[in-house]
Image (tube, helix red, strand yellow):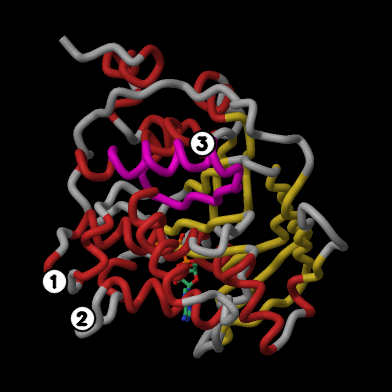
Amino acid sequence: MTETRAAHVPTSPATVSPEPVLTVEDFSVEYRALSVVQAVRDVSLRLGRGEVLGLAGESGCGKSTLAYGINRLLRPPAVITSGGIRFHPRDGDDVDIRALEGEQLRRFRWEQISMVFQGAMNSLNPVKKISAQLEDVFTTHRPQMSRSERRERCGDLLERVGVERRRLSSYPHELSGGMRQRVMIAMAMALDPQVMIMDEPTTALDVVVQREILQEISRLRSELGFAVIFITHDLPLLLEISDRIAVMKEGRIVEMEDAGVLYTRPQHDYTRQLLGSFPSLTGDRGDFIRHGKEES
Ligand SMILES: Nc1ncnc2c1ncn2[C@@H]1O[C@H](COP(=O)(O)OP(=O)(O)OP(=O)(O)O)[C@@H](O)[C@H]1O
């Protein structure tokens, strides 16, 4: 268990709207390899505009498969066997994500739903400066943007995630792991997506850096109003940052609830087991999560 954090039971902030930005219905995915693995089974969920939805569950329960499936990033042997995913843009008609192909799908991914991958910081190109890597997003998706405007936007993006703009001229190896991960988050935010999927975005980082980045994500979410699907094994962390939490077990969502309610009144045995497996959530140390009190 990582060290405890100055946590609170979240309350639904004003930025969360009951209006959905994403609806997933009866979604199932299989891996058809030597044997067939039913990784996601009949999952249905609604993500509210501006909501942080945490996905919890032990390794192998299907969290990443669900997230990749939503963003159409699954590769063979994965097969989507049923279900629908609809995106509800702020303006305009609903988008059937399963029906998107080619260029349409590529644009949709960056512009409407972006993703921060597990260990993303290691996917920066080591021989290209940060400026070039951030600018690539705009060169591809906003070709009409002038060079100076691109530069300006990239500097603004870095500052937004707490990295000084002078770092634009650095190479990835000149940045700490935390800074590199912030760059990846900046990149995922570049086109102002309405949904960000974050798969263990801070797992490889030390606890202090993790905490700083999570605070940054929460702040930006309030400021910019995007919704987040946040995946991690770390249930205490999810309780801190999520509005609602979906608990997955063997490919199914067994419980989905407001984070505070899930913590105080878990309904499913498996949720209770999961909560019980984190020492910081039980006994006196639970005060830390419940009331933000330091351990004595
Ligand atoms: N490429 C693949 N081929 C075959 N089976 C796979 C493949 N990728 C994942 N699986 C299986 O699908 C199931 C769900 O895996 P998934 O990675 O989605 O779980 P997870 O909850 O995200 O796990 P973790 O937290 O360890 O990343 C597991 O049983 C896993 O072994």
135 to 285, vertically: above or below: below
| Residue 286 shown left or right of residue 207 in the figure | right
Q: Position of residue 273 (x, y in %)?
A: 44, 35
- Look at mark 3 in the image and give the residue it sits on: 242
* Label 1 neighbour load within 10 Å: few <14, some 14-19, many 20+: some
* Label 3 neighbour load within 10 Å: few <14, some 14-19, many 20+: many
Bounds of the magenta segment? 211-234
Mark closest to the chain's N terminus, 2 or 3:
2
Q: Which amino acid does label 3 sit on?
A: Ser
Mark 2 to mark 3 CA distance (whole Å): 33 Å
Q: Position of residue 109 (x, y in %)?
A: 60, 72
Q: Judge: label 3 CB < 8 Å from ligand 1.
A: no
Name the residue rendered at 59%, 36% in the picture: 244
User: Residue 252, which numbered label?
Assistant: none
Q: Which amino acid does label 2 sit on?
A: Pro
Q: Which of 49 and 147 is in front in this view?
A: 147
Question: Hey, which quadrant is residue 287 in on the image?
Answer: top left
User: Residue 126, which numbered label?
Assistant: 2
Proximity of marks 1 and 2: CB atoms separated by less than 8 Å: yes
State the SS at label 3. loop
Proximity of marks 3 and 1: CB atoms separated by less than 8 Å: no
Name the residue rendered at 45%, 70% in the picture: 150
- Look at mark 1 in the image and give the residue it sits on: 173
Q: Nearer the viewer, residue 131 or 7?
A: 131
Q: Can residue 277 be seen in this view?
A: yes
Q: Which quadrant: the N terminus? A: top left
Q: Which amino acid does label 1 sit on?
A: His
Q: Can residue 36 be seen in this view?
A: no
